[in-house]
Amino acid sequence: MTIRVRFAPSPTGYLHIGSARTALFNYLYAKHVGGKFLLRIEDTDIARSTDESTRSILEGLEWLGFAPDEEIVFQSNNADKHRAAALKLLEEGKAYRDFTPKEDRGDKNIKEAIVEKARQNQGVKSMRDNPFRDLSKEESDHRAANGEPFAIRLKVPEFGKTSFEDGVYGLTERDYAEIEDLVLLRSDGHPLYNLAVVCDDIEMEITDIIRGQDHLTNTHKQILIYQALGATPPRFAHLPLILAPGGKKLSKRIHGEIVSMTTYRDHGFLAAAFRNFLALLGWSPKTEQEIMNLEELVNVFSLEGIHRNNAIFNFDANNPKRWTDDKALWMNAEYVRTMPIGELLPFVKAELKSAKLWRDEYEDDDKEWFEKTADLIRQRFFTLKDFSSQGRAYFSEDFDFDQAAIEKNLKKFPDLQTWLPELAEKFEPMESFTHDEIETVVKQFTEEKGAKLGVIMNGARALLTGLAVGPSMLAIFETLGKEKSILRLKSQVAWNL
RNA sequence: GGUCGGUUCGUCUAGGGGUCUAGGACACCGCCCUUUCACGGCGGCGACACGGGUUCAAAUCCCGUACCGACUACCA
């Protein structure tokens, strides 16, 4: 039987880091065994689901490169089937109508309310004390026929326990006494999560469910539903959670965009790098190799490498340099700096285009120059954004000067104001403007002036790139070319800043 | 409150009774290279939550405590 897994997000926000990692693990698992990776949008909560969120999730998945192998399933389209299943269970006596009026809960403190209620009911409350649980069929039918609203609850057996072998957490058991007669169908006729998931997973012939650990206890309820429906439950594997710094829950509300996939895309992350980073959060290949492309990840992925403890996604909202996890940033830099240049170029192009720095010659007459330059400057870059910010001077005459660079490398040595234009003069007659020739000229010039090579070079760097850091100056001269080098060495704009 | 789960450097992790004076990566610090540096090279700092057992031997097994998390909704 082919393995079929699904990623089933609910469209109540963007694709966040936890869901993205769940999608990744499902994808890796499916591909590893030659199975299918499916996508289902769980939009049964009409009040909270939005189309915009669905789009955002799809966008995130697309960016990461996880295309579903079959058509996307929208859970809300299956509501009729879910209702039918609930009715069937009711018919078979495996569920019952609950005529208790719906309780209005203040939306805000639901968790607190639950705890409070549980505290009050301590030791008294039984999960089976619903007065409608054993209502006769006749009376139940009668009241329903009279138009009395009701919810349908699953009739959980009095004694026994559910158990299953979790792919990550091992044997998991739960006593029936701990499981309430869960609501299958709301009094307004809307199917509830646990019913919907089970029905859809049966219908989609899902064989393995890989999802967040927050569903671990739900699984027992779902197994009860599978059994009532006469279906064999699939295999389950639960993933540890990804937490915020300090070990608190990562929340869309509190942590905002920092957890959204689109943020990473928009901040110049390479999907390959982010995927790689995500894979290492809660999973380990058990080797010391950390840089792995998708294919390698697929090859070595196994449930056995998944942790049971939660991982922290580190970031510091108040520190621009640490706006997201250090390791994610490093991973991205590693990819930017070491991936085959040919694979990187399309991303550089897209970045330059969006910054209006792209010129079509880069793919034509200046193709070689473009490749060489991108290759040269990427050595110190972290994200794709750096090509248009720090790398701006290589693609445009309109670039900014870093104040600190000017102070430190230019104004501190007033002689440079005449020397640098003089150096430009030395460049003028050069026929071949390449590394070695430039070196000869610059060195000779430096000796003439009795100056330090570093002073000349760094001054030139400030003038030619606006920055205090970057590749070797000889390489910069060469890549910028004679004309631009001369022009910028003579320019006085930086001196007047 | 109850049930269940988890706990190795700041963070991601290796390890599953002796090979652990606990390994790697990121971050941090230092040194080197150098015309600069956010590159590169070398090195350093730094952890088995705590308390009891079991054992010749425990990071590894058992129990308890603490802390963290999930679930406990006519949310998903």
Image: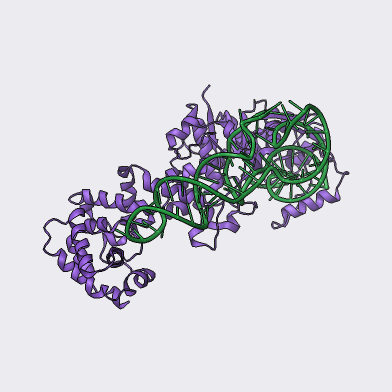
Chain colours: A purple, B green
Pick the quarter of the image with the C terminus of chain A.
bottom left
Relative to A457, residue A198 above or below = above
Q: Which one is in front, A168 or A157? A: A168
Q: Is residue A400 left or right of residue A321?
A: left
> Residue at the spot x=51%, y=39% of the render?
A24
> Residue at the spot x=33%, y=75% of the render?
A411
Q: Which residue in the rendered view is the most extreme toward the top?
A: A1
Q: Which one is in front, B22 or A256? A: B22
Q: Measured from the top left, where is residue A204 in percent x and y?
A: 55, 31
Q: Measured from the top left, where is residue A51 in percent x and y?
A: 50, 50
> Residue at the spot x=26%, y=72% of the render?
A416
Q: Is residue A133 left or right of residue A42?
A: right
Relative to A205, residue A62 above or below = below
Q: Measured from the top left, where is residue A474 in percent x and y?
A: 25, 57
Q: Which one is in front, A449 or B22? A: A449
**Quarter-of-image position of residue A391:** bottom left
Residue A159 visible, this angle: no
Q: How many marks?
A: 0
Q: Is residue A54 left or right of residue A451?
A: right
Q: Which residue in the rendered view is the most extreme toward the bottom?
A: A496
Residue A445 visible, this angle: yes
Q: Is residue A390 left or right of residue A87?
A: left
Q: Which one is in front, A134 or A374? A: A374
**Quarter-of-image position of residue A293:** top left
Q: Measured from the top left, where is residue A254 in percent x and y?
A: 60, 58
> Residue at the spot x=61%, y=54% of the render?
A245
